Amino acid sequence: MTDLELLIDIHRSAERQGPGGEAETIRAMELAGLDRSRPLKIADIGCGTGASTILLAKALVADITAVDFLPEFLDELQARASAHGVADRITTLNCSMDALPFEEGEFDVIWSEGAVYNMGFEAGVSAWRRFLKPGGKLIVSEITWLSETRPKELQSHWQTEYPEIDVASAKIGILERHGYSPEAYFVLPAHCWLDNYYRPMRRQFDAFLERHGASDEAVAIVEAEQREISLYEKYCDYYSYGVYVSRKLMV
């Protein structure tokens, strides 16, 4: 199997493909002031297997387009949406986030939890703006430094993995430069990483290795995930996902 196929296998059955939580999704929704009484058109970009998509569909009167480049994740999302009774509110779209086929001003809300890094924060928020109606809301989470200085080991790791990592003030400045008015910001707490993402994934490692005969490729995947978990456990005071809520300006 390819590395991508192995990564799909290790993450597909998980509730989440990255840090997050139901309470935090609801908090972002409330900070954005989303109206629960009127129909909204929402794009959830980089939706994975749909943790946030399904919660939005249950909480809002919404027509949601759930976008991911992995059809396996979208298949799982559809099954989960049916189980939760919200399949009629969600349309899946197998597509890259940098080649979206949407119309200008099509959406009231663009939502993206833990996914914009695939395109890059600045590239993503600037490209997606045109798909929002004037006054539409952008809710996006992004890996963010929590202090101006941090340990050298941590700095080196993330500069290699994602050079766009930065402090919240820099991310807010990007939003302002690209025609958004920032309205709210908060940091995902540690339980969103440990209880909701890392520990459930760690419990799957043995079964994953057994399924793949402990191949070199499968072992390498597990070792890489273990390194990332250990890094967070050691340095969680210095970084997290920041959740950014912004409004598209009229001009």
Image: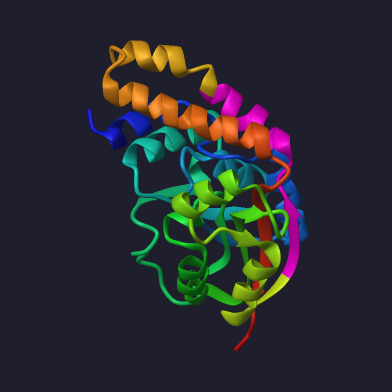
Write the start and end of the magenta stretch as one range: 183-201
**Residue lying furthest bottom:** 251
- Residue at 42 percent of width and 60 percent of height: 119
Residue 43 position within the rendered picture, expressed as x and y whole percent measured from the top left: 51, 58
Above-or-below relation of 49 to 164: above
Quadrant of the drawing holding the C terminus: bottom right
Residue 203 position within the rendered picture, expressed as x and y whole percent measured from the top left: 53, 17
Q: Nearer the viewer, residue 79 or 137?
A: 137
Q: Nearer the viewer, residue 179 or 233?
A: 233
105 in magenta: no
Above-or-below relation of 78 to 138: above
Above-or-below relation of 43 to 241: below
**Residue lying furthest left:** 1
Residue 230 position within the rendered picture, expressed as x and y whole percent measured from the top left: 58, 30
Q: Is residue 66 among what the camera can see? A: no
157 vs 215, left or right, is right
Question: Magenta region, mostly helix, strand or loop?
Answer: helix
193 in magenta: yes
79 vs 108, left or right, is left
- Residue at 63 percent of width and 67 percent of height: 171
